[in-house]
Image: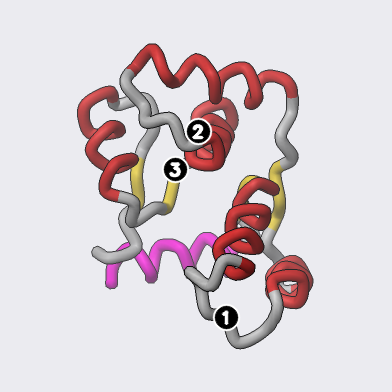
Amino acid sequence: MAARNEIQAAWDRGEAAASSFTFWEIALHHAKGRLELDVPPRVLHQNWIADGLRTIPVDDEIAIRSVELGASGFHPDPADRIITATAIVGGYQLATADEAIINWANQTRLVAILDPKD
């Protein structure tokens, strides 16, 4: 619950941000039936932006860094690599419940993790 409070506080301060690729992943999982949403992904995106969420576009540095993560033992999922690289390049804390990312981050200390389950 503390992590959720921290996320909400960041949102309230206008500091919450997400990789633009996060929305690609949300839309993909929704289209495959792996993620149920109350509204379509496009509407979710529009609502979150209207509520103050900032998006971070994938630039050249993020793209290259995402590939370089493989050398540190990061798993091969390209979306996870891009989202994690976004946090590393921007110096952001990464909110994720993905155990593979959490375990990798705990070993490498390349990115600070905020686990929403906490």
Chain-order first, disc 2 or disc 1 = 1
Chain-order first, disc 3 or disc 1 = 1
The residues tagged by marks 3 and 1 sit, at their Cα atoms, a distance apart of 25 Å
For this orientation, the residue located farthest to the front is 32
* Tag 1 secondary structure: loop
The main secondary structure of the magenta stretch is helix
- Left or right: 73 with respect to 14? left
Residue shown at 69%/48% (left/top)? Answer: 20
Give the quadrant of residue 28.
bottom right
The residue under label 1 is 37
* Tag 2 secondary structure: helix
Q: Which mark is residue 93?
A: 3
Looking at the image, residue 75 lies above or below residue 29: above
Q: Does residue 91 appear in the picture of this structure? A: no
Looking at the image, is mark 3 or mark 2 nearer the viewer?
2
- The residue nearer to you, when weighing 95 against 103, is 103
The residue under label 2 is 81
State the image coordinates of residue 36 (x, y, percent, origin top left).
Answer: 52, 79
Span shown in magenta: 1-13
The residues tagged by marks 2 and 1 sit, at their Cα atoms, a distance apart of 24 Å
Give the quadrant of residue 64.
top right
State the image coordinates of residue 40 (x, y, percent, origin top left).
Answer: 70, 78
Residue type at tag 1: Leu
For this orientation, the residue located farthest to the bottom is 38
